[in-house]
């Protein structure tokens, strides 16, 4: 490895690899592997890779890149109801990328999201490459009870969504237009929407609190609401009714959509990168879930109901049935 890579590893270790006593790290960065104490609790593991030109613009600010790479994994832990504890980081770096300024910004972005949840970096790898910049993060968390599963939705459950949908999709649409040299019309909250795209807030506290309240089914929204809801429906072998006019929209997106069904369809229903949570829960948990939402300061709205599998998926817009879209959301090519 080059001197730059050694410098990066040292900086990652010194800033992000230092935890607190009792965080369960027996051996962290500096040996052949990490050693972690799970204290008899179930370990939850997830991993994601982001590649320049595929998942982010190559000229992205490294602080935003670090935040996003970590956030997509924390969102997966949130969807399981897990408490985030440790991470592994793999970086494929084109020559000259990891200069001192890039390293400082990347570490700052990572730490801004990791520090509040007590997350510790315990290992990983770096490699020089002639290909695009890529970031692979593995996140590990612990469960205090049963995991939230896609396969646990039951007929009669209410379907809830956290936060607001479509913000990142609209921001990305505008970012592509700008790069094509097109003139974007003025938009209320455009800067806020871009922040939602670059720095999504994983719903870690909501996932844990919902699990403790008795919720057993969840899914995070990365590829689009409908696409990710379909994972639940297939795993649980059920159908659903979705009242699209109940979907939570931010003020900027609501202003932009102006009640237009097609705009809501391509952003809130099928747009990706929201990193909100879908929760399916019995009606009996409705009051408890609203208390969870208040306690975790997370907006939470009922948007539909789980139906028998024979009912399929039904979408209504102000009580008028709408046809299912041909494209439910983003699907990765392989």
Image (tube, rainbow, N blue to C red):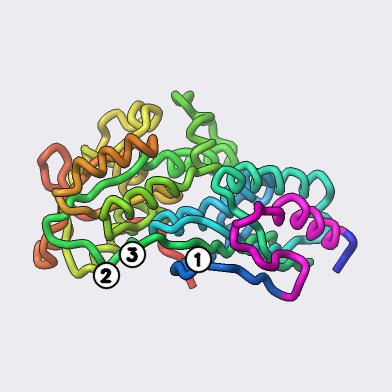
Q: Secondary structure at mark 3?
A: loop
Instruction: Depth check: give the residue in front, 285 or 180.
Output: 285
* Dot placed on the residue nearer the N-terminal end, 1 or 2: 1
Q: Quadrant of residue 88?
A: bottom right
Label 2 sits on a secondary structure element that is: helix
Rendered view: 96 above or below 318: below
Q: Is tag 2's residue or tag 3's residue first in the polypeptide sequence?
A: 3
Given this view, does label 2 or label 3 mark the residue nearer the observer? 3
As helix, strand or loop, the secondary structure at mark 1 comes to: strand
Q: Residue tagged by mark 3?
A: 146
- Residue 170 makes an appearance in the image: yes
Magenta-colored stretch includes residue 26: yes
Question: Residue 103 appears at what percent x and percent y?
Answer: 77, 49
x 46%, y 42%: residue: 168
Cα separation, mark 1 vs mark 2, equals 19 Å
Q: Horizontal and vertical percent for residue 326?
A: 28, 58
Instruction: Tell me the magenta residue range.
Output: 4-32
From the image, state whether disc 1 or disc 2 is nearer to you. 1
Residue drawn 76% across the image and 57% down it: 13
| For residue 221, side relative to residue 160 (left or right) | right
Using the rendered image of the protein, determine whether residue 223 is visible from the camera's viewpoint: no
Q: Is residue 303 above or below residue 9?
A: above
Return the residue nearer the eye: 270 or 110: 110
The residue at which mark 2 appears reads as 235
Callout count: 3
**Residue 67 or 119: which is nearer the viewer?**
119
């Amino acid at each position: 490895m080059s001197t730059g890579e050694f410098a990066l590893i040292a900086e990652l270790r010194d800033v992000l690899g230092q935890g607190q006593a009792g965080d369960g790290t027996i051996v962290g960065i500096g040996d052949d592997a990490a050693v972690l104490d799970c204290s008899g609790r179930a370990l939850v593991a997830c991993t994601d890779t982001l590649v320049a030109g595929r998942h982010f613009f190559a000229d992205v600010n490294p602080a935003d890149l670090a935040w996003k790479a970590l956030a997509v994994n924390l969102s997966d832990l949130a969807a399981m109801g897990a408490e985030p504890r440790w991470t592994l980081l793999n970086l494929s770096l084109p020559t000259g990328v990891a200069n001192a300024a890039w390293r400082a910004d990347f570490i700052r972005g990572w730490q801004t999201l990791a520090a509040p949840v007590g997350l510790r970096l315990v290992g990983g790898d770096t490699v020089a490459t002639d290909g695009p910049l890529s970031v692979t993060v593995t996140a590990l968390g612990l469960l205090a009870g049963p995991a939230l599963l896609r396969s646990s939705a039951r007929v009669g459950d209410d379907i809830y969504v956290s936060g607001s949908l479509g913000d990142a999709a609209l921001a990305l649409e505008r970012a592509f237009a700008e790069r094509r040299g097109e003139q974007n019309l003025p938009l209320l909250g455009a800067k806020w929407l871009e922040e939602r795209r670059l720095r999504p807030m994983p719903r870690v506290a909501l996932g844990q609190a919902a699990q403790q309240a008795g919720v057993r089914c969840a899914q995070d929204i990365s590829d689009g609401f409908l696409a990710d809801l379909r994972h639940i429906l297939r795993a649980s072998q059920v159908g659903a009714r979705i009242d699209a006019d109940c979907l939570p929209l931010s003020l900027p997106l609501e202003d932009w959509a102006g009640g237009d069904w097609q705009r809501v369809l391509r952003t809130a229903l099928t747009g990706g990168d929201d990193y909100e949570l879908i929760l399916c829960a019995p009606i009996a948990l409705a009051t408890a879930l609203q208390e969870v939402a208040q306690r975790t300061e997370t907006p939470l709205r009922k948007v539909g109901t789980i139906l028998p599998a024979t009912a399929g998926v039904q979408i209504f817009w102000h009580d008028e049935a709408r046809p299912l879209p041909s494209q439910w959301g983003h699907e990765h090519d392989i």
